[in-house]
Every structure is written in structure tokens, then in C-alpha cells.
Image (tube, rainbow, N blue to C red):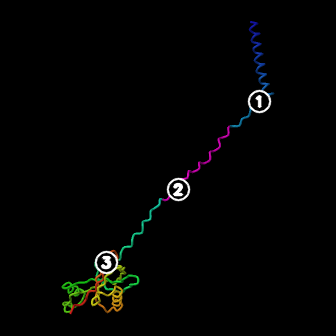
């Protein structure tokens, strides 16, 4: 039993020596271990820069070609009083009227307030309800036909005579106008009253 005791005593002594040595070594010379701070949190990512939206380029809008100015009167025939003639600028100022003939003239005159006795003899009746004036362009080769005028007179003379009628205001006759392409092509003086 003795050898067992010796072996146990040796093991015990060795254990104490190791334990004491380790304890002593730890107390006297602590092991050198690097001090490591906790890992730094990752740097915050900067806020993402907003991606600018592409600026839409303005879509060019084609400007419509200037529409030609609408003619004052459409192509056709019109009855009117001539109020002014500007032959220097080839213009004519007119007041459109309604013209009625024969029995229609009698009926319309009565409807407008004329007595039946006065209206019964009318062969032509002119109604002018709208005072609106219109300025029309004269065609370069306008034909002017005036009652009692000289058919062979130059155009400038006919336009001067027409201007005189317009200025006087005494002429109660009306004029039939022919308009084509926005310009007056023909001016024909017509009698308002009954022919004798």
C-alpha cells in the first residue's frame, strides 16, 4: 500500500504545485492579452442621395400657320346700301339690307308697320334692321353699274360717282353686290322705288 500512497502523494504534490504555480503565476504576472475594444459599429451609411428625375424636355408644339383671315362676306350676292367708298385703298363700306319684291314687298312693309293703303303699291321694299357696317375689299377689276351713269366711263369716274351717292345719303337706291374670294367683283345700282 505504500507505493500507492507514494504515488498519490506525488500526484497530490504535483497537483498542488501546478495549481499553486498557476495561481501564483496569474497573480504575479498576469497573462498579456491584447485589450480589444468591442468592435465599432459600422459607420452609418450616408442617406442615399435622391436620384434626380429626368427633366422632361418640353415637347415643341407646332404653331399653326396663321389661318387666313376669314372674308367679311362669303362668296355670293348681297343687297346693301353703300355708305362709303375709299377708292385709294380699294375699300367699300356697306350696310346689308333685305329686299322684297311684288306681293312679298307689300306683306313685309305691312308687317313692319306701314299702312295697307301705302304698302299696296310697292313693287320693292327694303328692310334695314341691322345697322352693322362691313368693310369690303374691291377687286382690281370690279365692275360698277350705276343707274343713269355712263357705261363707258372709266372705273375711277364710276367710283367717284358712287362715293358722291354715299356721301349725300339722298340716294335711296340700293346696290346688288357680287362677292368672290372675299372681294367685291360687281356693284350694280338698283332702284328702290317704283319706276314711273
Is residue 180 placed above or below 157 in the rendered structure?
A: above
Boundaries of the magenta span: 39-58
**Side (left or right) of 129 relative to 25:** left
Marks 3 and 2: which is nearer the front?
3
* Among numbered discs 3 and 2, the one appearing first in the sequence: 2
Magenta segment: does it hold 52?
Answer: yes
Q: Which residue is mark 2?
A: 55
Marks 1 and 2: which is nearer the front?
2
**Side (left or right) of 62 relative to 112:** right
Q: Which quadrant of the figure has residue 66?
A: bottom left
Q: Are marks 3 and 1 in contact (CB under 8 Å)?
A: no
> What is the spatial separation of the Cα atoms under label 1 and label 2, in whole angstroms?
64 Å
Quarter of the image for the N terminus: give it: top right
Q: Position of residue 163 (x, y in %)?
A: 35, 88
Q: Position of residue 107 (x, y in %)?
A: 20, 85
Q: Which residue is mark 3?
A: 179
Q: Are marks 3 and 2 in contact (CB under 8 Å)?
A: no
Secondary element at tag 2? loop
Is residue 188 placed above or below 196 in the rendered structure?
A: above
* Among numbered discs 1 and 2, the one appearing first in the sequence: 1
Marker disc for residue 32: 1
**Side (left or right) of 43 relative to 16:** left
Front-lying residue, 193 or 57 = 193
Q: Main secondary structure of the magenta part?
A: loop
How crowded is the residue under tag 3: few (<14 C-alpha within 10 Å), some, or many (20+)?
Answer: many
Secondary element at tag 3? strand
* Among numbered discs 3 and 1, the one appearing first in the sequence: 1
Q: Position of residue 51 (x, y in %)?
A: 56, 50
Marker disc for residue 69: none
> What is the spatial separation of the Cα atoms under label 3 and label 1, in whole angstroms?
117 Å
> What is the spatial separation of the Cα atoms under label 3 and label 2, in whole angstroms?
54 Å
Marks 3 and 1: which is nearer the front?
3
Amino acid at each position: 500500500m505504500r507505493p500507492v500512497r507514494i504515488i498519490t502523494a506525488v500526484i497530490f504534490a504535483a497537483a498542488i504545485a501546478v495549481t499553486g504555480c498557476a495561481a501564483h503565476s496569474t497573480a504575479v504576472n498576469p497573462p498579456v492579452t491584447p485589450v480589444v475594444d468591442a468592435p465599432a459599429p459600422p459607420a452609418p451609411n450616408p442617406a442615399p442621395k435622391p436620384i434626380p428625375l429626368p427633366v422632361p424636355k418640353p415637347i415643341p408644339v407646332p404653331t399653326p400657320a396663321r389661318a387666313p383671315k376669314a372674308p367679311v362676306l362669303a362668296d355670293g350676292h348681297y343687297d346693301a346700301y353703300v355708305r362709303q367708298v375709299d377708292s385709294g385703298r380699294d375699300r367699300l363700306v356697306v350696310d346689308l339690307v333685305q329686299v322684297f319684291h311684288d306681293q312679298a314687298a307689300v306683306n313685309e312693309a305691312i308687317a313692319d308697320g306701314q299702312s295697307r293703303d301705302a304698302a299696296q303699291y310697292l313693287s320693292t321694299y327694303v328692310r334695314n334692321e341691322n345697322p352693322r357696317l362691313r368693310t369690303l375689299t374691291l377687286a382690281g377689276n370690279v365692275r360698277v353699274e350705276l343707274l343713269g351713269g355712263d357705261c363707258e366711263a372709266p372705273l375711277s369716274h364710276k367710283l367717284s360717282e358712287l362715293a358722291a351717292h354715299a356721301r349725300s345719303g339722298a340716294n335711296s337706291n340700293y346696290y346688288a353686290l357680287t362677292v368672290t374670294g372675299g372681294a367685291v367683283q360687281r356693284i350694280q345700282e338698283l332702284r328702290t322705288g317704283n319706276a314711273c
